[in-house]
Image (cartoon, coloured by chain):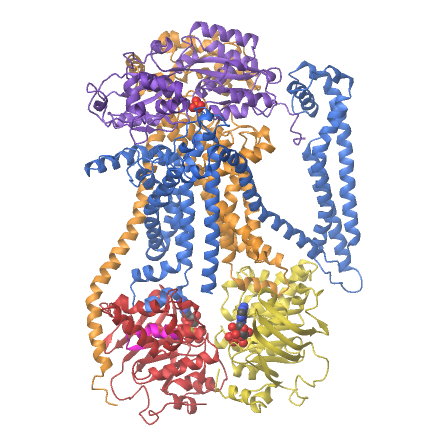
Chain colours: A orange, B yellow, C red, D purple, E blue
Amino acid sequence: MNTSIPSDADISRKARDIRLAARLEQRYAAERRFKYLAMGSVIFSALVLAFLLVTMTANGLAGFTRAELKVPVDFAGAGLTVTADRLAQPGAENALAAAGLPDVLQFAAAEAYGPDVAAQLGSGAWRDLARQLVADPSLLSREATVSVPVSEDLASAFRGDGDRALQATARRLQEQGVFGRAFDWGFMERADATDPQEAGIWGALKGSLLTMLVTLLLAFPIGVLSAVYLEEYAPKNKWTDIIEVSINNLAAVPSIIFGLLGLAVFLAIFPNLRSAPLIGGMTLALMTMPVIVISGRNAIKSVPPSIRDGALAIGASPVQVVFHHVLPLALPGILTGTIIGMARALGETAPLLMIGMRAFVASPPDGFTSPSSVLPVQIFLWSDEIDRGFVERTSAAIIVLLLFLLVMNGVAIYLRNRFERRW
Amino acid sequence: MKMNNPDLESSVAAGFTDAGPAKISANKVSVYYGEKKAIDEVSIDIHTRYVTAFIGPSGCGKSTFLRTLNRMNDTIPSARVDGEILLDGQDIYRSKMDVVQLRARVGMVFQKPNPFPKSIYDNIAYGPKIHGIAQSKSELDEIVEQSLRRAGLWEEVKDRLTDSGTALSGGQQQRLCIARAIAVDPEVILMDEPCSALDPIATARIEELIDELRGRYAIVIVTHSMQQAARVSQRTAFFHLGNLVEYGRTSDIFTNPRKERTKDYITGRYG
Amino acid sequence: MKMNNPDLESSVAAGFTDAGPAKISANKVSVYYGEKKAIDEVSIDIHTRYVTAFIGPSGCGKSTFLRTLNRMNDTIPSARVDGEILLDGQDIYRSKMDVVQLRARVGMVFQKPNPFPKSIYDNIAYGPKIHGIAQSKSELDEIVEQSLRRAGLWEEVKDRLTDSGTALSGGQQQRLCIARAIAVDPEVILMDEPCSALDPIATARIEELIDELRGRYAIVIVTHSMQQAARVSQRTAFFHLGNLVEYGRTSDIFTNPRKERTKDYITGRYG
Amino acid sequence: GCGGQQSTSRDQIKAVGSSTVYPFAKAAAEEFSRAFANQYKSPIVESTGTGGGMKLFCAGVGTQHPDIANASRRMKASEFETCQQNGVTEIVEIEVGKDGIAIAESKEGPTFGLTVKQVYEALAKEPYGKPNTAKNWSDIDPSLPNEPILVYGPPSTSGTRDALAELILTEGCKTDAATKALKETDEDRYEQICTEVRTDGAYVEQGENDNLIVQKLASNPAAIGVFGYSFLEENADKLRGLAVNGVEPTYDNITSNAYPGARSLYIYVKKQHLDAIPGLREYISTWVENWGKGGLFASKGMITSTDAVQAANSAAVKNMTVLDASVLK
Amino acid sequence: MSPAIFVLLAIGLGLVGWLAARSRAWAFASSGEGRTRLHSLPSYHGWYVALWAFVPAIVFVAIWNVVSPQLVMQSLLADPAAAQLPDFGINRDTVLSEALAVARGSAQAVFNPLAAPLVEPAAAAMHRYGIIGIVVTLLIGFTGGVLAFLRLKPDFTARTRVERAVMLILLLASLVAILTTFGIVASLLFETIRFFGMVNPIDFLFGTHWSPDPMRDPAYANGADYGALPLFWGTIYIGAIIAMIVAIPLGLMSAIFLTQYANPTFRKWMKPILEILAGVPTVVYGYFAALTVAPFIRDVAKSLGIASASSESAIAAGLVMGVMIIPFVSSMADDSIAAVPSAMRDGSLAMGATKSETIRKVLVPAALPGIVAGVMLAVSRAIGETMIVVMAAGAAANLTANPFASMTTVTYQIVAMLTGEGSFDHPATLSAFALGMVLFVVTLGLNFIALRVVKRYREAYE
Ligand SMILES: Nc1ncnc2c1ncn2[C@@H]1O[C@H](COP(=O)(O)OP(=O)(O)OP(=O)(O)O)[C@@H](O)[C@H]1O
Ligand SMILES: Nc1ncnc2c1ncn2[C@@H]1O[C@H](COP(=O)(O)OP(=O)(O)OP(=O)(O)O)[C@@H](O)[C@H]1O
Ligand SMILES: [Mg+2]
Ligand SMILES: [Mg+2]
Ligand SMILES: O=P([O-])([O-])[O-]
């Protein structure tokens, strides 16, 4: 065989190579386009998110502040018949109210700035003051300048909205240095109120915490256990198929339908628990459980069979195999699914509307059975408030919800990493 | 080919008229995967004193048959076993058989080393723990050390028992798996191509180890390497297309096969 | 052992002083995975007219070296190559080398058949399509048919070209992968243990196929079965611990190895 | 134990119902808890919509059922019937005030007044039985601006929409004699012609979120919006009320019924709960105390009822006069 | 006696049983000559006895929790002080329950003076029945425990039995899904049937005109107003078409970038960041859609000469919804692309394919089942979404393909009808249940088909 004469094959290859090279330019261009498109999608999504977060933060930061007026009050001379001891006991605020604190405050404000301004004190201003007194009973025996919230009208005048006369007043007070916006820690401590100056997020936040706790405690074990059953033990038969279809279906059913279920079933069984985090949590648990089952099954599936074989071969029973080996290894994956499910539950509004969690509850819930709202519903309710002061409060509440979400994700990611490290 | 069947060369033709009772005795065992017959009426006796090698071309059913011996094929839903397998005279497929206990008695080592993603210590201690073999922590420590020693791994890992078993090299992992199997003090150890994922040095180490363990446990090893079978075993069973074609002393099988098929395989005509 | 090196028995000692220029010529190639050196200064010439077999114990670097030949190791981030590999005299690791074109010229078949989850037709047509080799549908049909014919699969699948490639049996899948590689009409075909997942009958079929393809393509096959190397190849390279220990005519390597290590391996002292 | 559902006590008032009444009910609850901080827990007010509220309210007597239903319309005879069947036999109806509906636009928009007839012709799906073809306001009346008709308004499920239909559209519809006559012959058709609103985009149902309407109006000066009067008042800096039939939507005009859009708001109280739920009486009294002119509710945008109505309802509260089915329809 | 005490009691019994049985098993193990090998670990013996002590006790507690209040009530009514109670009704109930609450200690004082004299007898009765309950609980738990204890012996198959109980728990857990499904059907069925009693199902399912008026006299309810087709169409158009046109390419491409091009650290950070998109409350998206996107789209449409463009449009809602569900698609796609065996990728690269060719022609098709599953999840999320629709798409039930028209969806109508003015015997309100039922049945059907498809696919693959 003489290798120096090009064979047919060699000739056809030459032709092919030329054709191939001609196309290469195009193919690399396509490659670049594709890559930039892919990168573009990530960047676009990130930008939308950034845009949302930035606008929300920009709008919402003001929601953590409120307009406050400095009022000099002579407590010693006001004749408040409340002793410092009484302040240390429960119900001190009401005792102060009974002793005429609201009037004292009103009077002091009128003295200092005239009756017009005094009329613009927030309706709950005395309550704020009472809280300050409880915190520092020594105030009772002296003269002090206290900061109290003003009415929504004056607050919006300060923003440059609303009544012209009030706007002038606001400007005048501001120039005197006694009026301005201050950070409102109380926002994180109070519950809902009709006056945006008085409204706080703690009630809804606590409601969300309690609800999520119930959801987690129900959905996680049930979800994980059914995932284990379906993936490891269930015989492949019609019944298993039915269970599988119902779970997949439940993951896809619109959330509002779970609300209807909660209404028709849970509230029929526990009629007294309308609006309670317990019922909310149970409803959301049903919604979250399938998500955990599905991700749990995937996580379990991805544990290599060799681990199961290894354990079985030294005489571990199937239950031991799962609880000693498979579940610990699948845990990070299960946690991921749980985060997704819980995040969705955390932001859910519609089903909770059905079971009464849109109630106006002026005090934070005492426990799992007392009426409560949750963050997303609070946001929904506030976004529909007439008072425009709620616009900022709404954004602030959104920020709180997002922070909650981030904390929840953070905890789960931390746990996930920990578990991964341990193995 | 190197042969190291020390004192047994002179004994009676293996597997058929051997002295003493068989540890495992299979009678007309057939295995089906669904409709498909993977093992066809195989009868074989396995003795504690020898290492038995299963050889044969890929897909001939070596692994399948091996897994019937400790009912690991129970994990394959489509698998079905006919015939009878006696362990110390008792049928392991009888309905009251406790599979968990069976597997503690008949250990298994797999083709790919599969240590648990736990510490080396826990890998070994797991079996004794679930079987309640150790009464105390010190007893457990003792078992762990001894198993690792027997598996020839102790010196290499004694200072890092808390490291993850998966951090070891392939050969070490496989020895860890052997130690894990030893730790529950089984009577039989089944090994399915234990060296096929290992390098030659690790392979040599495992082969030595098998030699050391011989006599204490009945050992069955599946291998696709005839050289390996020749090196480590005293009895060889040659499978082909689901049949046990020939079973006997390793030396006889390799030097003087009785069946044409065996001969063809040994000389590399297929496989 | 069965040898079928027809007309070549008499040619000059393979790989070193062979007639005609080498298709692929490696000069002092070293491959590192991170810090670890997996291949140590290997030099070898590969010719179109022969089937070249790489043998050696597990982990000796056969696959690693094979993958350097068409830069498939680019996909492993930690891998790094030193030295020079010439394809028709041009360094494939030079910076302007077009990897896409290189891989069209140097095809590869993997250990586990990996047909795309597409129809049989699309599996074959994939390469010609992306490279724009076919100008028309009929030309493409032509290429598909011819590739399947050459891979000896046409008769078996011609009536079900639209079936999924994954629905074929293991041996058929592997032949499909070979057909897929042939379809872009490469100059070299690299095969990494192409039969290790197949049964003996399928293996025999692939071996035949390799024999048929010989001469048209430079074929390099990695195998762990010495019998297979002996059956299909005319040149054999024996690797050990990252070194190329010996390279020469297959008949010489198997009957008359020059190095002690080769001999030990051939006679089954390890591996 | 918590198992027995029949006999648990409740120490919090529960009110459910209309989203229109909700802000006032909240304010009343706050006022109540301020006044009785030592004695009673603050009430739970839930905005379920009037219909949903009635369903809950009429479900039965007992602590698991609400004590009060807020309503932006009168209880329906059918609902009353349900109540009776479930043992809610003693219901006290209290009219607490009025909600004005107002038509408004952005301050930047063109100023114009409308008549109920024009509104009807602009919004009805089939004005006087013929398909609505009007695109611009000027298509209805050349004197109106040549701007596209775009009206944001409440959805069919809300009380405000009902008021729009009843107080404005039906009035406009009746101006056509032929259509009015239809009422006698084919009431169904009559209702349909007079109350059905067009769906071709000229009328945009805007959920219950009136805030959003305000913002949309601000961004679209040519559009007008229909919503509760309180929103107009709250957004007086951005919005301007449109005169209807020449009457401006001012507080006084609505109170005096001169402006054609005001409907009564009610609360329904379960008399059977009066002695069982601590503070229920006091809570109702809070309503009475605050519904006057210049009172709390007025400051939140509620329109006060006439003195006569107030007097009658005060008396009803005092005597806890039970509602008689015959006044309902 | 609070139920917590009973539960603690049952747990205590279990604990005692556990400890006793375990030490007994230890004794077996270490007695006799040398060592006996137990069938099961001592702790399994412990669990076995603990279960037998705990389960019967807790079952009794559950029953007692229902029965004992009635017993207390009976003995309370038998008390002379009960003679003054008002007749039946809520007052009587509350007086009684107040007395009980005070007796229980969960309230400080009675609100109703009538309740005061009842507190004493109530406390006495509760005490009495509390003691009885405790004794019986103890007795039952103890008997169960002892009987179980007596069965223990070295070769007792405790593990097998305990594991059977574990399996039962697992089975029960997976039945929760079925129960939920039944619960949903049950809670929708009754009202749906009522609705179909008023409105012809054919009219409802195939009618093209939707304008139910909840305020109108139900007698005039006209099937012609209940044509839900525009709602179904709006749901599909917004949630499954427009939103998906945004979410699928963006989500998929993001996943591709993150799995195939980005370096691992970038991926590790970016993935959770994108997931935040799914966590932003939908109210926020609603505002974004209504105030930023919708006017922008209207202006663009107007400038393109589409006069009919309204500022409430299906497209505005759909686009924003699409952005919201990008992470659903990208997360699932990411996982399934990463799960494609690298042999596929290598195979394609070895053919001389470029990276993007490999992705488009091999990886994505191979990952399709996972991607489709992600898309299904995303679609269902989009279909279930209400707030964005409410705020940005208007609420008009239009049956049109014009993306600039305003539209509405099923879920929005459900919420609106259920929280609206209409009374609950009105077909308009009841239609919410029928709509819910249709949604449920449709998703169920889709899932059934999906299961079939996946099964067939799997068979072909392996
Ligand atoms: N789970 C299974 N389902 C169906 N068939 C199977 C299964 N496992 C193995 N088989 C088939 O049974 C036959 C015997 O397989 P087995 O794995 O026992 O072969 P082997 O001798 O161990 O081969 P190898 O050397 O490749 O491991 C083969 O044809 C194989 O395809
Ligand atoms: N991706 C990788 N990263 C790091 N080390 C690797 C990688 N791939 C292979 N190696 C190491 O490089 C050495 C050579 O491996 P290679 O896969 O080339 O061997 P081989 O001869 O093909 O073996 P086998 O017969 O088992 O396929 C081995 O020690 C292996 O552990
Ligand atoms: Mg095998
Ligand atoms: Mg290799
Ligand atoms: O909530 P409404 O019943 O007042 O619309």
Given residues E117 and C117, the one toward you in this image is C117
The answer to which image quadrant residue B243 occupies is bottom right
The answer to which image quadrant residue E406 occupies is top left
Relative to residue E187, is residue B107 drawn left or right? right
Relative to residue A114, is residue B198 drawn left or right? right
- The chief SS type of the magenta part is helix
Residue A156 is a magenta residue: no
Given residues A77 and D281, the one toward you in this image is D281
Q: What x and y, as percent, mark residue D168?
A: 34, 18
* In the image, farthest residue toward the bottom: C10
Q: What x and y, as percent, mark residue A346?
A: 46, 38
Which image quadrant: the N terminus of chain D?
A: top right
Instruction: Mark yes or no: residue C94 visible.
Output: yes
Residue at position x 60%, y 89% from top? Answer: B252
Ligand 4 located in image quadrant = bottom left
> Which region is colored magenta?
C175-188
* In the image, farthest residue toward the front: D185
Compared with A330, B157 (above or below) is below
Given residues A33 and D221, the one toward you in this image is D221
Instruction: Mark yes or no: residue B202 visible.
Output: no
Q: What x and y, as percent, mark residue B93?
A: 68, 69
Q: What x and y, as percent, mark residue D254?
A: 36, 11
Compared with E436, D300 (above or below) is above
The answer to which image quadrant residue B131 occupies is bottom right
Compared with C237, A100 (above or below) is above
In this figure, what is the number of numbered marks? 0
Given residues B198 and C7, the one toward you in this image is C7
